[in-house]
Amino acid sequence: MRSALLRFTLFVLLLCSGSFTFAQGDDIQKKLDSFKQKDNLSDWIYERLDYANINPTQGSLYLIDTQKKIWRQAKTIEEKVAWLNLLNTQGYIFLLDGNILSSINSYEAAFDYYLKNKVAVYDIVEYTFKPLSNNYTRLGDYEKALYLQQRSINFLIRKNDSPQHLSLLYSNMAISYRSMGNLSEAEKSVNAGLKLASQNSLANIILNNILAGILFDKEEYATAAKLIESNIPKQKNINQDNAYTLMNSFITAGDIFRKLNKHLVAEGYFNKALNIHNQYYNGTRLREKANILTQLGTIKLLENKPQLAITHFNQTLSTLKITKHNKVDVGKIYGDNMVVDVFQEMAEANLQLKKPTEAYQHIKLALLSADKIRNEFADDKTKERLQANLKIIAEKGIEITFNLYQQTKDKSLLNEILNLAEQSKSRTLLDQINRNQVLAADNQKDSLFIKKRAYERAIIYNEKQEVEGKSNKNSTETAKLKYFLALVTKQIKQKYKQFNTDNYNTPIAKVLSALPNKKIIEYFFGKDAIYVIDIENGKVNNVVKLGHSNTIKSTIQSFVDTYFQHGPNAMMNNPKAFYTASNRVYQSILKGVNLTKNQSVIIVPDEILGYISFDGLITKKDFSANIANWPFLIKTNTITYAFSLKTLVSNKAKINDKEFTGLFITHQNNNNKPLKAVEAEAESIRKIVRGKFFFNEEVNSKTFNQVFEESKVLHIGTHAYLSGKNQEPTLDFDKEKVFLFELASKKSAPSLVVLSACRTADGLLANGEGIISLSRGFNAIGTSATIAGLWNVNDVAAAVITNNFYIHLLSNETSGEALHEAKLDWLNSAQTSNIFYLPYYWDSLIYMGTDQKIELSPAIKWNLILGIIGGLIVILSAIIVLKKRLSI
């Protein structure tokens, strides 16, 4: 029987050379039948691998067919190795064919098989980990790539493998770090590899290629050019084994000289790369060829030769098998950054040709491919990073569509602008909402769901240990758990079709028809411009474009930092300066928008705007020293907020017969001295609303998880803050902390969560996704709405406002209106000092989500009842006494 590893090595060489021929037709079928009759599974598999090699156009389909025709499972080690070679070869052929997602699936299947069957003799690093991690890097799933690369390094160190092999793994790790923008770690990985690689070796050349790319990203173009030009002459005696490295050197040189505006030199290098490809890899490595063709087209764009650029781009699309006769087949578009890039460049070429409609169509195709990449991943962090790239594409689409609207006044284009804005807003949140809804409804006895929950619990435990500083050894284990969680989630998506529902493909007209009958203002903050989308009565009325995007962003950032993020002093010390700054922000972000008095408005913010409460904005320029009389926006309009229109529609109002629950921490750090404001807040709410109240030691994660599913309104009165190196939003239950990542899916969720704590609507800003806050976390697990604080709330003001909120809620007002009226009560009440009318004190709490009427039971008025009972007793006693007297 033939050696499995030897045959696989031979197969890879054959795949590269394409010079070997093998008997086909009846002869090969006779051999296959003979192997099957002898129950010789190993040679049967290898015979089919050979056939796939000499028929590359049928290779992937033939190997899929091989899996269907297998007559039994592999039993011996040699048979299991053969099966692994089949899966890995299939992954390799898919990659050469440009089908990266199918390639990933094949390599993942090989990894899964390796783990389940414990095939220790197999070189899993070389044949599975390396190509699979490279595929992850190509698609932007860097966490998975880095996990496999680190695992590979550890594996080779244990084996005492050669320094040369280790150095190549460091090169892969450097590429992953570089791709995710972590250039310092990328450079560390390169240097670690260079220490192991011998001078002028292939590994040394590869590492210097990557280092030149890192210098390119750092915009050190001259240094990068010097390095790459010194690296190219080192590469001699070019053959199948090293031609790929030289091709990459030429591509890197082309990129660098393009940035140096030496277009002719850059074009020369790209053509050299193309020649290498055609000589050594003709018909294979299609992604690399597509990349070179796209770069050649980009140079023509820079030279203002759009028609020549389009010729190159059409060649790219043809190479990637997406077009036929220069016509795009939308059904063949798949998720790949190469596809995204070429459609973006095609859009630029059409803009140069004054063809905006065609340009917009190509932007939509770029977004389609980007969506397919994004939908491949289960990890939310990866999705958030991809979302930032998607927003860049969406901005170009909005710019093109807005200009078209200015020319044609075609109202349907306004819907297109809204649709693009929604593409870049809280999509990961919507995924989480939909995923949790499915999980809550589905039969979770399936072993896949059980595995998923086990991985999630382990990840939460490790992350909590790390954030709390109790352990620094869990990051590697967490990376491993996240990797396998992603694989299980992928299996669930394949098994349960409802997990694949893409709510972002819901027609925007359908979304508009499902919105509440209110005025809605949605913002899109782009790099070059800000767009204000005015929606009312289920249609987009207008879109306003604000120029000087960076100036407006800077103004808002300064306003937030100066007056809200560092306490009230700046506002107190110079009220007039605050007044002017607030009015400036109001004028800049609501320019061109007509607000009718007493109109309810939903704000869908973007980027830095998510840190602002509109209620406290000043609507008029004339300053007055009497702060209570200032023209705050809250005095004319009721404002609520939404993460996006699609999350608003998805998380609908809930109807249930549950009641109020309050969790209050009135003592902290084992201190017997109570937090008076929290204690007063709890006692005042207890007098207004009937429900369950938990205090101090009764409040912990177990209680929290229990009452979460049993409450209509869940009120949490404690401290909150951002903790750990990743600034995780955190609820402080004194002896226990609850982090954002602990909020897992539930079968039931409150209609409203009131977070009467500091900075519960605050968090890190993820571009294209929004603020990652506790408020958002509750929305993700099914809560229809939250009331949360944007900055460090004043305890007394928060207690009074939440108290009045419940009074108004019991008066049959919607929850958004109730918060609005509670804030107005503060402004209309006498305060001990004029400064307490400043927005810092009363405007931190905002209402995010579905505005709804919530029926709660009023508290039992025991004093009144006892008084009535006492009165009745007195009356009865008097009657009895009177009767006795009359009877005498």
Image (cartoon, rainbow, N blue to C red):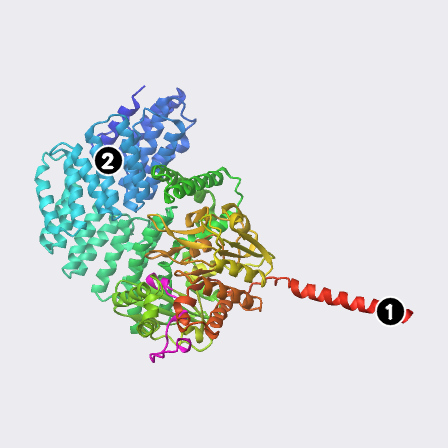
Q: Residues within 10 Å of mark 1 (few under 14, many from 20)?
A: few
Side of 176 relative to 412 (left or right): left
Figure quadrant of residue 427: bottom left
Figure quadrant of residue 72: top left
Q: Which residues are magenta?
A: 605-630
Side of 173 relative to 644 (left or right): left
Number of numbered discs overlaid on the protein picture: 2
Outermost residue to the right: 888
Taking the image as drawn, is residue 428 in sight? yes
Residue 781 is situated, as x and y percent measured from the top left of the image, at 47, 52
Residue 600 is situated, as x and y percent measured from the top left of the image, at 46, 72
Mark 2 lies on a secondary structure that is: helix
Q: Amino acid at mark 2?
A: Leu
Q: Residues within 10 Å of mark 2 (few under 14, many from 20)?
A: many
Q: Say whether residue 390 is magenta.
A: no
Can you tell which of label 1 and label 2 is closer to the viewer? 1
Residue 25 is situated, as x and y percent measured from the top left of the image, at 32, 30
In the picture, the disc for residue 169 is: 2
Mark 1 lies on a secondary structure that is: helix
Looking at the image, residue 495 lies above or below residue 869? above
In the picture, the disc for residue 883 is: 1
Looking at the image, residue 882 lies above or below residue 756? below
Q: Residue at x 49, y 56 (%)?
A: 717
In the picture, the disc for residue 307 is: none
Q: Residue at x 13, y 31 (%)?
A: 198
Taking the image as drawn, is residue 94 in sight? no
